[in-house]
């Protein structure tokens, strides 16, 4: 480790001490489950890298476990967005050690225009607060090209949905939309014991890489409308769940069996349905 900032950060007192000194007790309402193991946070930081170009954006640094790892692994411009005002005191020694590489933004990430933070290329890295994780992700994916990658910790059940393929129980609207926009891979699964305090569920780190273009051409809102209708009644045949959008006629025009259930359709099929719906609506 030759980088002087990395050396300084690695030499800071242990995170547990920083947390105790700042009186930073975890708040459940803010989804605070901290990662204290530096080997683990460095592994996540490496999966998000390389970090030495553009801007690394961390959501919810809390007391700074992952933040330390990102600086040690070479982040040269790191912006950390945190809603809990108590974090500033815990992070102060880290901000000093980072010598201008770390900027703390005290704000609710739901209100921040993350797509314009810092210089491109931008990557988001976060151990997300689980209560707003999906909302945050869908917000970022409104402008997928603003991000080079998103390396994010979710509860495993959500990660499974992001990665699910047709036929899997976890396959649904989120799988279709996210895989349409991004290449998704699982980095690792973590047991509750990896966190302090331990949550009730397993967690997973997922890396999402926005595609230069969606996997198949389609209008996003129409695709959302079709998947919402189809998976809104996932046990039903498509002819039933898509009745309000054209039912049998829509399915016939798209070349899809009306007796199929939504979990059998691939992303390409949903895009074909969306395009058929767009055509039919424009001809009305
Ligand atoms: N990054 C730290 C770690 O890995 O140990 C903390 C992760 S903890 C799961 C989630 C963090 O997100 C907490 O620090 C919490 O205060 C913060 N947070 C919760 N809701 C937030 C929001 N809406 N905007 C920004 N930060 C938020």
Image (cartoon, helix red, strand yellow):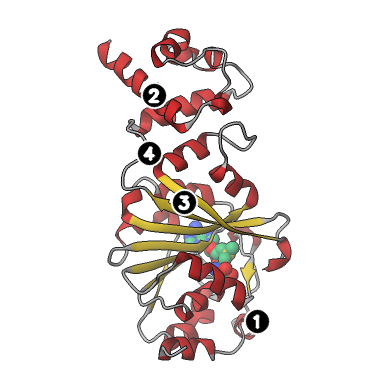
Disc 3 under 8 Å from ligand 1? The reply is yes
User: Which quarter is ligand 1 in?
Assistant: bottom right
- Nearest to the eye among marks 4 and 1: give it: 4
The answer for how far apart the CA atoms under marks 1 and 2 are is: 53 Å
Q: Is residue 132 left or right of residue 33?
A: left
Of the two numbered discs 1 and 3 on the same chain, state the one appearing first in sequence: 1
Of the two numbered discs 3 and 2 on the same chain, state the one appearing first in sequence: 3
- The residue labelled by disc 4 is 215
- The residue labelled by disc 2 is 272
Whether residue 7 is visible to the viewer of this picture, yes or no, is yes
Residue 245 or residue 69, whichever sits in front: 69
Residue 226, above or below 153: above
At horizontal 54% and vertical 45% (from top left) the residue drawn is 162
Label 4's element? Answer: loop
At horizontal 56% and vertical 26% (from top left) the residue drawn is 264
- The residue labelled by disc 1 is 16
Q: How many marks?
A: 4
> Quadrant location of the C terminus?
top left
Whether residue 63 is visible to the viewer of this picture, yes or no, is no
């Amino acid at each position: 480790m030759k980088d002087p900032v990395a050396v300084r950060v690695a030499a800071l007192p242990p995170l547990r001490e920083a947390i105790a000194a700042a009186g930073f007790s975890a708040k459940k309402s803010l989804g605070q489950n901290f990662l204290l193991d530096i080997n683990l946070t460095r592994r996540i930081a490496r999966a998000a890298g390389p970090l030495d170009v553009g801007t690394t954006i961390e959501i919810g640094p809390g007391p700074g476990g992952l933040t330390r790892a990102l600086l040690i692994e070479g982040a040269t411009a790191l912006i950390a967005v945190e809603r809990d005002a108590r974090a500033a005191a815990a992070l102060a020694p880290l901000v000093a050690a980072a010598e201008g590489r770390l900027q703390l933004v005290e704000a609710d990430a739901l209100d921040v225009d993350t797509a314009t933070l810092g210089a491109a290329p931008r990557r988001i890295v976060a151990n997300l607060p689980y209560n707003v994780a999906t909302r945050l992700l869908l917000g970022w994916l409104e402008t997928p090209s603003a991000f080079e990658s998103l390396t994010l910790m979710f509860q495993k059940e959500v990660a499974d949905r992001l990665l699910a393929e047709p036929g899997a129980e976890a396959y649904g609207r989120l799988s279709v939309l996210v895989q349409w926009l991004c290449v998704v891979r699982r980095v690792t699964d973590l047991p509750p014991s990896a966190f302090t305090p331990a949550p009730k569920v397993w967690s997973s780190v997922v890396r999402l890489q926005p595609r230069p273009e969606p996997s198949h051409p389609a209008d996003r809102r129409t695709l959302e409308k079709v998947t919402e209708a189809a998976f809104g009644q996932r046990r039903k045949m498509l002819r039933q769940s898509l009745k309000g959008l054209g039912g049998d006629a829509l399915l016939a025009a798209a070349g899809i069996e009306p007796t199929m259930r939504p979990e059998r359709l691939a992303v390409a099929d949903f895009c074909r349905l969306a395009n058929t719906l767009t055509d039919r609506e424009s001809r009305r």
